[in-house]
Amino acid sequence: MIARVTLEIALRKEFDYTIPPELAGQVEVGSRVQVPFGARKVMGCVTGLAEESAQPRLRPLLKVVGTQSLVTPGILKLARWIGEYYCCAAETALKSVLPVAVRREQANWRARLQVRATAPGEAPKLPRRQREVWQIVRARGELPLRELLALGKTTAGTVRRLEDRGLVRITAEIAERDPYAGEHILPTQPLALNPAQAGALAALREAMSGEARAATFLLHGVTGSGKTEVYLQAIAHALEQGKGAVVLVPEIALTPQTVERFKARFSAGPQPTLVAVLHSHLSAGERHDEWHKIRQGRARIAIGARSAIFAPVAPLGLVIVDEEHEHTYKQEEAPRYNARDVAIMRGRMEGAVVVLGSATPSLESYHNCVKGKYRLLTLPERADGRKMPYVRVVDMRQTARAEKGIPIFSPQLKEAIARRLEQKEQVILFLNRRGYSSSLQCPACGFVAECPNCSVSLTYHRQEQKLCCHICAHVAPVPAVCPNAHCRNPAIRYAGLGTQKVEAALAKLFPQARAVRMDSDALKRKEDYRRILGDFRAGQIDILVGTQMIAKGLHFPNVTLVGIIYADLTLHQPDFRAGERTFQLLTQVAGRAGRGDVEGEVFVQALTPFVPAIQFARRHDFVGFYQQEIEFRAQLNYPPLSRIALLTLKGRNEEKVKLSATHLKRELEKAAGELPGLVLSGPAPAPLLRAETYYRYQIMLRARSMPALSRRLAGITQELPLPDGVALSVDIDPLDLA
Ligand code: ADP
Ligand code: ZN
């Protein structure tokens, strides 16, 4: 037998190896293997088995990793599809389907030494130390060696002597790491569903039981409408059918709060391993154990961020993609897959039902419902009968005129904060930019402090007293006077604002209030996030100021006021999705208000208060927003009415990059004849021309359907000769156009 192996080093080719007799029976499609390659040993994945090979002289495989094939045939097929659709090498796609901790065998099961009493009753005469230790073991029957050493204040040598006397036995056992071991989670029971939830669940159950089980649903439910309860009961149905489920949540929403809801329903009872969590905050060892729990079938529900879509749940009955519109589902490096779209493909391949859930669906998904490709399920009201918060839009141009310069708080918002503080209620203030001010500018000569590596201005961070680039993290000292040698103006000014400035302004306006900032600068350690949220829940914080980190998924009943400091920040970006993004963000942030007994109130401050994204968000009107936005997309031939591929060339030498882009454009034009409806634009400098010292030029392709374009692009880009120092990336269905 011959094993066909895809090597981890990107060669876009399979290599054949013989299977030596001692490994016979251990090698199957999906096995991780180590093979000789030249003088090196490299890792790879068996992607096929064959009787004979076209290559002469084959070398044997060296080693098989793990006792079970790590990549199941289903996942292998999915990886192949990713390679083809997203135009990347098969080995790049294959690499992404296994967590590093599993792939590299860098982590393994942790063995734990266990001490067990073997002789009952009294032992013969023993030295005092040994006797004490022996008594502990006898009382406990069995305990971990480590614990025994601590309890008996003794050494392993003493325990070994007891073993020599035949009184105890020391054995190595697998000790599974459980990242949630310390938590005491109380089990929950299914809630009685309201009619909208019951209708949605019935449709899902029917699809899961039907013959043609592969079906995609969009569950559109306002924030707090009880989507999670529908997920939980649909998962229970999958389990009843003997199948498992994969639940995807955005990384940012993978909070203990979310995980706990799933564990409480399925893992708090007699089967504690039923839910496995795949999370980037876990240690390599924990990830290894969680993954293998799924592979061995002891965990039937995998919950995690983007890459959890590759969790080896089998058989798979259900895939849930919560907050399906979230951009974190898109991987911004090769393979540039979108986990939501991979989920739909996996569901189709494995006959599983896929549920996309959101309060603010992506235009793509909603459009697919309109076209009849997905089925729409709607939860129009909050599950607990509470009203949607009242949203007021404040025209900041008036305040700006009255105050000169950019104001932070309108009089209305100030007054509202004061009132809520007086009533001992809590406030969330949102601004989508960290730092103190967005740029440092000299009013005399016009100098702006810019990043030496990127085409952006540096952000002033007052607390740390530094200037910082938000693209490449370059740090520069804060100048006391204008650095321009001809100017030296001491009155250098900070323009624009960030969360630090909001925090500082709050301290002045409401010195008695306890305000805490939550953004990636404020969170230095991973526990900070939990600690701040814990303090906020306990009422030890009155006002939480933050970036998108606080926009999603948080449920705090005592928050009655949400203030959005500038709704325009996301709006005026060179991206056709800017309006959609603003609508989503406003709706999500507004959803944090009024989740308790007191009705919530939201203030949206804006310099352009009448744009549709803000007005539709104010009325909680997603469908209205969709209808007007889809027209705009149609006029400009943008997704979802077309499909986009974005080709980016980058390099340190701008001329070389430009030339390569022009050359690529010519090659694409030659192929355009075979692809009806193809529209090419560019090459043009990327909106962010320079990032991390690289110049970037882009070509955008718009097509009616993607697979044909992907295939053609793979050919062209592989054959394209590129000068040294210029690299090309292909992004299919891009979300980030900068
Ligand atoms: P979503 O996921 O849509 O944001 P959640 O599932 O978090 O909504 O539900 C919001 C709140 O409503 C939660 O506190 C949840 O326990 C409660 N809830 C959900 N469904 C019901 C129901 N059928 N009856 C009573 N309360 C419910
Ligand atoms: Zn930079």
Image: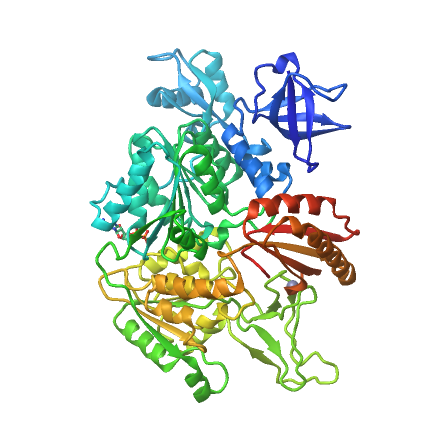
Residue 271, quarter of the rendered image: top left
Whether 600 is drawn above or below 266: the answer is below
Q: What residue sits 49% from the left and 87% below the top?
A: 404
Q: What residue sits 33% from the left and 22% below the top?
A: 139
Q: Position of residue 263 (x, y in %)?
A: 34, 40
Whether 576 is drawn above or below 143: the answer is below
Q: Position of residue 141 (x, y in %)?
A: 35, 20
Residue 468, quarter of the rendered image: bottom right
Would residue 35 appear left or right of 430 to someone viewing this image? right
Q: Is residue 72 visible?
A: no
Q: What residue sits 42% from the left and 85% below the top?
A: 398
Q: Is residue 529 or residue 55 the one in the foreground? A: 55
Whether 257 is drawn above or below 16: the answer is below
Q: Position of residue 184 (x, y in %)?
A: 32, 41
Count the labels in the image: 0
- Quadrant in which the C terminus appears: bottom right
Would residue 233 appear left or right of 628 to someone viewing this image? left
Would residue 414 appear left or right of 193 to someone viewing this image? right
Q: Is residue 485 or residue 535 the one in the foreground? A: 485
- Quadrant in which the N terminus appears: top right
